[in-house]
Image: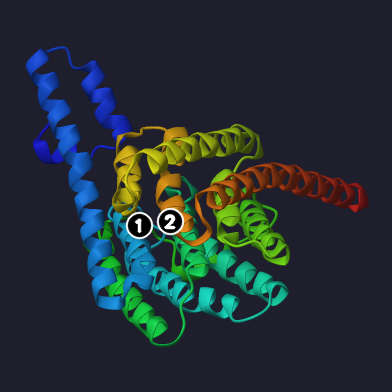
């Protein structure tokens, strides 16, 4: 395996390669490459977000994060349709990211629920037809981040410009890497194949309603960072209900672990180091092969920002509360929606004429 090929491996793949290598010299080489990759990715992420922050303003660093996530995903993922038609999906996705979060923030919670529902459902249809690519974890996450860190006026214009540049960059990278894909499905097929009687269609709707309603509940309660609950719901709401239960437990448990680690760092480090806690979390994510520890380290960045706004104790309490609520709420809603769907199917079958 070449140096470049090793850089393309996931954290899980790198750790497995290191574990399976018997030769001490080769093992050391793999370990060095793995460490280099973690810090290279971290440096790239910091550079991209810093450039966005410098050009569009610090309040738009989240736009840089959104574009970065999209670029990293679209290097390898596809939409299950012709590559040229996939460019239309990218345009649609970024159009929603530009307009949806701003509109939702400009109205009261109940109208915002309907805006979020329409936007998230469209993101699912446009970006998640190929379910195994797990694209929703990028595009819906980007939407929720932009919703949670809203801007207005000139800053919003800068955000639009930054997302437009990101859209063009994503299109170029996507076409270059995916142009030889042999798909026959077209852009229209994404909508033609949307069917609430299919497992995929029901998952689209479940995730959309659960995420949007969790944000509505948080907003009606007057709690800040409503998107934290939405992100937790999105992360837990997997295509198969039985998988959600284990994911839910990991989500709330390792958020508590992450908050505990954050508290330790916050108390031990000098105040001048607080801005770097998020970076420490990013390095931790790079070394984490599984969902649980990635969840724990992902808390660092969110809390380092929130602690400056609400104070450390309130930020930690809000983070834990939002994630426990989102995790449990998703499992309950999944079960409830499945029961309603099963009841409706049974009722329909009973009413159908027997031959």
Q: CA distance from mark 2 to mark 1?
A: 6 Å
| Any part of residue 85 in sight | no
Asked if disc 2 and disc 1 are in contact, CB closer than 8 Å, the reply is yes
The spot of residue 252 in percent (x, y) is 58, 38
Residue 55's mark? none
109 shown above or below 2: below
Decide: few, some or many residues near mark 2? Use Cα within 10 Å; few <14, some 14-19, many ≥20. some
Residue 314 located left or right of residue 284: right
Whether residue 211 sits left or right of residue 25 in the image: it is: right
Could you tell me which secondary element the residue under label 2 belongs to? helix
Image quadrant where one finds the N terminus: top left
Tell me the residue at 32%/54% (across/down): 275
Closer to us: 119 or 146:
146
Could you tell me how many numbered marks the image carries? 2
The residue carrying mark 2 is: 138
Quick one: 259 or 33, which is closer to the camera? 259
Q: Which residue is mark 1?
A: 69
Q: Is residue 80 above or below residue 159?
A: above
- In this rendering, the answer to whether 39 lies above or below 69 is above
Kind of element beneath mark 1: helix
Residue 137 x, y percent position in the rendering: 47, 52
Q: Residue furthest bottom?
A: 153
Would you identify the image quadrant in which residue 54 lies? bottom left
């Amino acid at each position: 395996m070449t140096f470049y090929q090793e850089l393309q491996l996931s954290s899980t793949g790198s750790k497995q390669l290191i574990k399976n290598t018997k030769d001490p010299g080769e093992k050391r080489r793999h370990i060095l490459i793995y460490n280099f990759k973690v810090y290279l990715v971290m440096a790239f992420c910091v550079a991209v977000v810093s450039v966005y922050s410098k050009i569009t303003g610090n309040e738009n660093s989240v736009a840089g994060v959104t574009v970065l996530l999209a670029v990293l995903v679209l290097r390898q993922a596809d939409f299950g349709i012709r590559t040229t038609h996939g460019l239309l999906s990218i345009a649609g996705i970024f159009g929603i990211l530009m307009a949806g979060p701003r509109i939702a923030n400009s109205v009261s919670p109940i109208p915002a629920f309907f805006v979020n529902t329409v936007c998230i459902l469209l993101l699912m249809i446009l970006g998640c037809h190929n379910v195994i690519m797990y694209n929703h974890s990028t595009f819906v996450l980007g939407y929720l981040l932009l919703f949670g860190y809203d801007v207005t006026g000139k800053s919003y214009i800068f955000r639009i410009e930054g997302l437009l540049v990101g859209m063009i960059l994503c299109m170029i990278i996507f076409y270059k890497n995916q142009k030889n894909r042999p798909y026959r499905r077209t852009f229209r097929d994404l909508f033609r194949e949307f069917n609430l009687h299919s497992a995929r269609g029901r998952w689209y709707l479940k995730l959309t309603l659960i995420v949007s309603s969790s944000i509505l509940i948080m907003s009606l309660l007057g709690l800040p960072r409503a998107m934290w609950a939405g992100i937790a719901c999105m992360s837990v709401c997997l295509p198969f209900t039985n998988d959600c239960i284990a994911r839910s437990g990991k989500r709330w448990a390792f958020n508590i672990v992450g908050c505990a680690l954050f508290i330790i760092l916050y108390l031990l480090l000098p105040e001048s180091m607080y801005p770097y806690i998020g970076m420490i979390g990013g390095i931790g994510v790079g070394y984490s092969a599984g969902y649980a520890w990635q969840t724990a380290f992902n808390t660092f960045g969110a809390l380092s920002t929130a602690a400056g706004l609400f104070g450390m104790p309130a930020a930690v309490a809000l983070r834990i509360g939002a994630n426990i609520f989102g995790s449990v709420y998703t499992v309950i809603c999944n079960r409830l929606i499945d029961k309603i769907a099963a009841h409706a199917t049974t009722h329909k079958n009973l009413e159908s004429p027997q031959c």
